[in-house]
Image: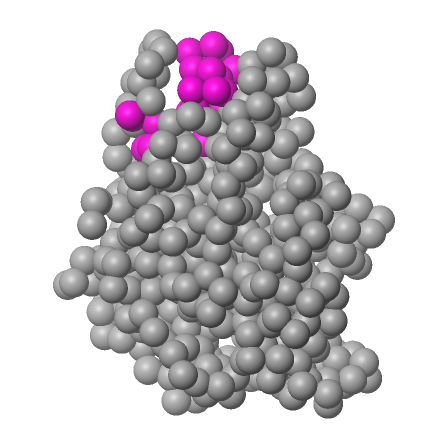
Amino acid sequence: MSEQPSVGGRGRAPDLGVLSALDTAAAVREGRLSAREVTEAALRRVAERDPSLNAVSALRSEAALDDADALDAGGLGRDGPLAGVPVMVKEELDVGGMVTTFGGLGNTMPALEDCESVRRLRAAGAVVVAKTVMPEFGQFPFTESAARGVTRNPWDLSRSTGGSSGGSAAAVASGMVPVAMGGDGGGSIRIPASCCGVVGLKTVRGRVSTAPHPTLWGALGVLGPLTRTVADSALVHDVLAGTTPVDRWHAPTPARPFLEAAASDPGPLRVAWTTSPVGPGTRVDPQVAAVTEETAAALAALGHHVERLDVRWPLPTPAFVPQFYAAVRDETALVEHPERLEWRTRATARMAVWARPGVVAAAERAGKKVAAALEERLAGWDALLTPAIAPLPPALGRLDGVGTVHAQLRSLPMIDFASILNVTGHAGMSVPAGRSREGWPIGVQLLTTAHDEGVLFALAAQLERERPWPQVAPPT
């Protein structure tokens, strides 16, 4: 891991862009930094870096400074695990006083209050500084839209951040903030994490509350942060973990706090690895395959029992597609001005007429069969290592001029290794693992069929210690 800056006194704002959430919160709790100076520094970084990236959709500068002042005065979260940590929030999550746009122009009324996950972040001391760009309703793994334009990758401005949490990933990778919330209904946290060289976990279904909504994309979606370190991911997930009576899904309580798991030695584990794609016709880029194999070798050198596995993936498509169409249709029905939605979104909603409740229920049942098949095929293994995405970060413009069907076809290589876990409800984590010859990030995915993400935190943190990755993208 790159060296963290000293925070022994006040006035070190230029260094704060590489400070972890864990260290920021400790410095604020101990009085070595104030929440205001941390927030001011984050806002300066946004002003400097976002014009070239387009990661931020809406700033709350004055409100964030007011929140920071209240925190410094002893307000809620002053001694919390995220005390003074600046965070950003994806556009699909409610922040009181801000419009929840879902990446488009269909809503104009501000949300009356925070959603449950944002409420928990604030209660832990986090300061919400902005919302982040996403493709409309998170339909595609490219952060491009008519309403918000394209979000550019901090590692190369000609490349995509992936999606749909691309704005959040770019904000974290560029050093604007150490934490940004995302959502994952088909890989939408893990895909941009891989493209931007940050950490992104899709939790087990029912780990993080989606209240005030009972679900996010039915059985497919989960919420969670993107961070630069495994420990920061664990820290934030410990804050977010737990559901409410509103939530449809409720995961079992983890065996121990995730931050504790990340700090522990995982011991020798049985880890399988594969680069065999889930879907027919997907091609894994040779550089991605090579980085995956190198990561497997690194795990073996750390003392784990590692074997290449010819995984016979169960096909998730019949379970995924009906739920995808129903989710987009149902979310578009909730906006105030449906006529303002993008033409491609309106087409997707029209095409979803066949995704009736009975069809969706059958898709959920199919998902349970896919989950059982995957558990059977990975029985005896603690974790499976795969590429996070099959290609390298793609060039911008993947959605230019194409309709919803062609856009979905172009999405398949991006979601190939990711979306099956949205169908099954299992956990998967994308962690940085290497760079392409061009200098672009390459991530790998660690997944487990256990219903506890602790093994992923322990394994990913061990990899991070052994093979540290850059904390912030270099200036482009």
Residue at 30% across, 39% down: 48
Q: Nearer the viewer, residue 302 or 133?
A: 133
Quarter where residue 283 is shown: bottom left
Residue at 63% across, 22% down: 77
Residue 148 pos. (x, y %): 46, 61
Image vertical order of residue 7 relative to residue 196, above or below: above
Q: Is residue 22 magenta?
A: yes
Residue 454 pos. (x, y %): 55, 45
Q: Where is the N terminus found, in terms of image quarters?
A: top left
Residue at 77% across, 51% down: 212
Residue range of the region highlighted in magenta in the rendering: 14-38
Residue at 62% across, 28% down: 124
**Would residue 432 be found to the left or right of residue 327 on screen?**
left
Image vertical order of residue 173 relative to residue 103, above or below: above
Per the picture, the main secondary structure of the magenta-coloured stretch is helix
Q: Is residue 131 magenta?
A: no
Residue 9 pos. (x, y %): 35, 9
Quarter where residue 60 is shown: top right
Q: Nearer the viewer, residue 344 or 78?
A: 344
Q: Can residue 424 be seen in the rendering of this structure?
A: no
Q: Can residue 106 be seen in the rendering of this structure?
A: yes
Quarter where residue 293 is shown: bottom left
Residue 359 pos. (x, y %): 76, 85
